[in-house]
Image (cartoon, rainbow, N blue to C red):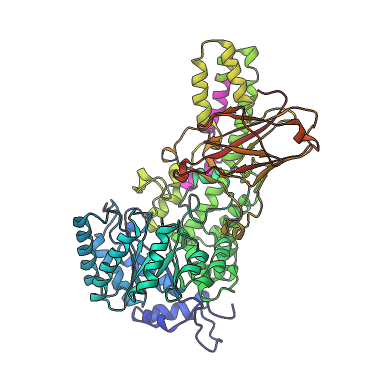
Amino acid sequence: MNKPIFLGVEYLAIAAFSIEYLMRIWCAPEHALYDTSHDGAQRPAIAMRGHQLGYRNRANSWDAWDVKQFDQYVRELALFGSNCVENIPFQDTSPGPLMRVPRSEMNVRMSEICQRYAQDYWLWTPADFDLNDREKREEALREHDGLYRACPRLDAVFVPGGDPGDNPPELVLSFLEDLARRLLAHHPRAKVWLSLQGFRGERAEVVYRYLDEKRPDWFGGIVCGPSSPSIEATRRRLSPKYPIRHYPDITHNVRAQFPVPWWDPALAFTLGREAINPRPVQFAEIHNALAPLTAGFLSYSDGVHDDVNKVVWNALAWDSRTPVRDILIEYARFFFGAEVADEAADGILALERNWHGSLSDNGGVDATLALWGGLEKKSPRLAGNWRWQMCQLRAVYDAFIRHRLISETALEVEANAALKAAPERGADAAIDTALAILARAVSDPPRPDLRGRVESLCEDLFRSIGLQTSRQRHQASGAERGCVLDFVDHPLNNRWWLEDQFAAIRMLGTEAEKLERVEQLRTWEDPGPGSFYDKVGDVARSPHVVRGDISTLGLLMERTPSPEVLWWEEGRSRQRPAWMEVMNWPIAMKYTGLDPNSDYNIRTTGNGTCLLSVNGERVPPTLDNKGIGEFKVFPVPKRLLKDGTLLLTFERPVETVNWRYQSRLSELWLLKGPTR
């Protein structure tokens, strides 16, 4: 690079730690981040650049850290451009089985670390109790006051309006006033910030009117993050006196503010929300689209798995024109060494591309594995480096899941072929054969070498950085918290659901009933010539879904829907996986080349209400079951088939329930012939 990613006066404070350390970082050729030919110090374009490092049991790694590890991580983030750290001092009261330092002590220690390296120290402190409860309110204020008094440095307190918490804005604003009085008594320059999470319409207007009328100087600004009103809408309404801080979710992959677009369900079910997730290109687009409207960001992070994303946001906040690959080369040069920097940067980009499109069809996944395997042989000295271990784990894990997906998809096809013989052999005999075929996923899985490598790398990461990839082995706080080792063997076909369906079939009273149900299962995803099946939320099984603009920016601006995978029974649901792949709702589904002289019926599964139009005309159902996985049937009027083309569109029902329970579409069949 011809210019540094960063260099600023604020980083002179780091010299208090070690001149020798700085000289090694800034001057050694293999680690050089500063171009000595540059005439002057570069100044960042964005003032606020930081990350939430909340020391709590819910985090998937740093709850196992000591003060020294936090000190090093804050220092490393600072060297890549951070100037803020946000802690979570009170929420989640469980001490955590891995914590080596009491939270009350670490809350102050982190303030001391920030003081040492000229980092702003923020606190994230939700009011997750009823603010009408005077006793709890006073207790919370005393707790805040005690921490404020103990911290040598404290620059800001961020109170989310909701998520968690469900208090009306009037009570929240009164609480903020009381917090501000206590905060300013100990830290006169500090500010209180608020998000509008959970506030919409009149509730948000209450906040805006308060700020317009009172214009309090203690108020720092509005934070925009997950479940908040958009940054654009907030900027239009918020007084220019107050800045906006972005609170981007760079840590979650699914059920998130910025989910991976059209993520293959095989990855969503096994890697889940908090897997190792370098997404440099996607997050560069998101940062650069939204940064001009803000004073900066402190990201939402719950562990080290998003380490690359943190550095990308830092670098772009210094100069949004910096090429992503250049950022990754600097990252790899510093943490891995110059001899592998370019290849490792390309390897990180390849990890992001592993998650694009159909996993089965993505031959690049095995190329990514080969790239990282070659780097591993080239640099055995890096075996204990936790950032290196994370890249290796992702490369191996993605490849293993791909091979399993291909294998288990083929096993289900083979099992369905065995069920075809049920009329001749008998339903029970055919079921026995199908079960034996499906069971080979357990008895004879593909690539046991990759499976073993996944396990060893997970253990290495627990030892090196405290990354908790398993509840049982590593005492992770929850299955959604990056427990990829617990889900590495999760079925990637319908095996669990079929096992339960077969058990129910055996209980039916007559052979005719059994055969009818077996045939329905056998042809579920293969309805026959002239008919079509779409697993609507599966990127590999939804050829008729109109996806529109599925670029990162297209999704960011909410122009197009993207599916997600719901979280049922702690990720262990035996329901049909398609029913957990949420699509609320596709833009459209399109079919061409149909026979205008034939009868067609549309059949769907999903949940709740389906308001279907065919070629712009609302079509009523003749079967309208509402439950998850139950069928709806819509006969297609023949007059709509004149040109052999059908365009299906869906009106979103008006509902007031939580998004998890809203109506949705899971599967859709276009069936040729009479109603079935």
The image quadrant of residue 76 is bottom left
Counting from the top left corner in percent of width and height, residue 220 is at 37, 72
Counting from the top left corner in percent of width and height, residue 194 is at 37, 65
Q: Is 314 within the magenta?
A: no
Residue sitting nearer the eye, 150 or 193: 193
Q: Is 440 within the magenta?
A: yes
| Residue at screen point 43% across, 42% down | 486
Residue sitting nearer the eye, 35 or 58: 58
Residue 353 visible, this orientation? yes
Residue located farthest toward the top when viewing the structure as drawn = 510
* Label tally: 0
Residue located farthest toward the bottom when viewing the structure as drawn = 39
| Residue at screen point 30% across, 71% down | 111
In the image, residue 295 sits, relative to residue 489, either above or below, namely below
- Quarter of the picture containing the N terminus is bottom right
Q: Which residues are magenta?
A: 432-455
Counting from the top left corner in percent of width and height, residue 184 is at 26, 75
| Residue at screen point 81% across, 38% down | 643
In the image, residue 168 sits, relative to residue 147, either above or below, namely above
> What predominant SS class does the magenta segment belong to?
helix
- Quarter of the picture containing the C terminus is top right
Counting from the top left corner in percent of width and height, residue 318 is at 51, 76
| Residue at screen point 34% across, 81% down | 16
Residue 337 visible, this orientation? no
In the image, residue 275 sits, relative to residue 149, either above or below, namely above
